[in-house]
Image (cartoon, grey):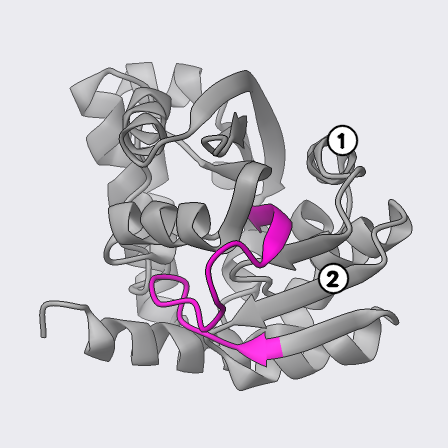
Amino acid sequence: MTDGTNRKTATADSFGASADGYLSSTTHREGEDLELLAAWCDEASWALDVATGAGHTAGALVDAGIPNVVASDASPSMVATSVDSFPGVAGVVADAERLPFPPETFDAVTCRIAAHHFPAPEAFVDEVSRVLRPGGVFAFEDNVVPEDETLDSFLNHVEEMRDPTHVESYRTSTWHQWMETAGFTVEETEHLVKRIDFRAWVDRMSSLDVETEVQVRRTFAEAPETALDFLDVRFENGDVESFDSPKALIRARNSPE
């Protein structure tokens, strides 16, 4: 189907089965990126966290003093986890590309480390613009790839091997283009890397079988030198120990009336 319904269902099921792993994941539950996204939204009265996962960003929005925070996700298990884990968060099961809210409902919308799972990211950006009030803040973070084609292909390949629900990590310039086309003004962009423990990274995917894990390890071991250098892949006793995950944080402002 053109809207990726089958893929979305598979993604929701996969993440629902991994809810506990994402709740405890260091990559998701802490970091300067989480604090920055929440700080960008701290003047909001109503905030929406799209594809909330285990709810860490929604919880950070509550901690930032926002009185009304809604966590949405396609996985009912993830929504339940976010509401149970972060007091003050309301939950809604929702498709990121078809948000079930009236126009101009929120002062701020966040989405953190999730959009690489969306089949139609441009539709998602359009939906964020629709549910945001004029002048509202879109605080966005996701895995990104560099402009280099070889590195782009390698990063997306290993992500999809580990997690078949991965659609694509895009370039920062592509996100800027989509946001500007939807009427946003990009106000700030930050780049960072998160150090990823390989064992925790593969364990987080409960559906990953041993054979596929071996293939992922082999792909890292046989990666081109440019990928090994860019990701600062580290080995211990000949096996992958950790690597860098590049991310972009973008603050964009919705068109004023």
Q: Is residue 107 magenta?
A: yes
| Residue 112, horizontal then vertical, whole percent | 57, 47
Task: Tell me the element at label 2.
Answer: strand
Tag 1 residue: 32
Q: Residue at x 52, y 71 (%)?
A: 73
Q: Position of residue 62 (x, y in %)?
A: 84, 56
Q: Position of residue 9 (x, y in %)?
A: 32, 80
Mark linked to residue 216: none
The answer to whether residue 109 is above or below residue 230 is below
Q: Is residue 165 left or right of residue 41?
A: left
> Which label lies toward us, 1 or 2?
2
Question: In the rendered structure, does residue 95 fall within the stretch colored magenta?
Answer: yes
Q: Residue at x 66, y 46 (%)?
A: 27
Mark 2 closeness class: few <14, some 14–19, many ≥20 residues within 10 Å: many
Q: Please, is residue 87 above or below residue 104 in the view?
A: below
Q: Is residue 246 visible?
A: no
Seen at 53% across and 59% down, the residue is: 50
Q: Amino acid at mark 2?
A: Val
Task: Specify start and end residues of the magenta stretch as a single range.
Answer: 92-112
* Viewer-proximal residue among 64 and 16: 64
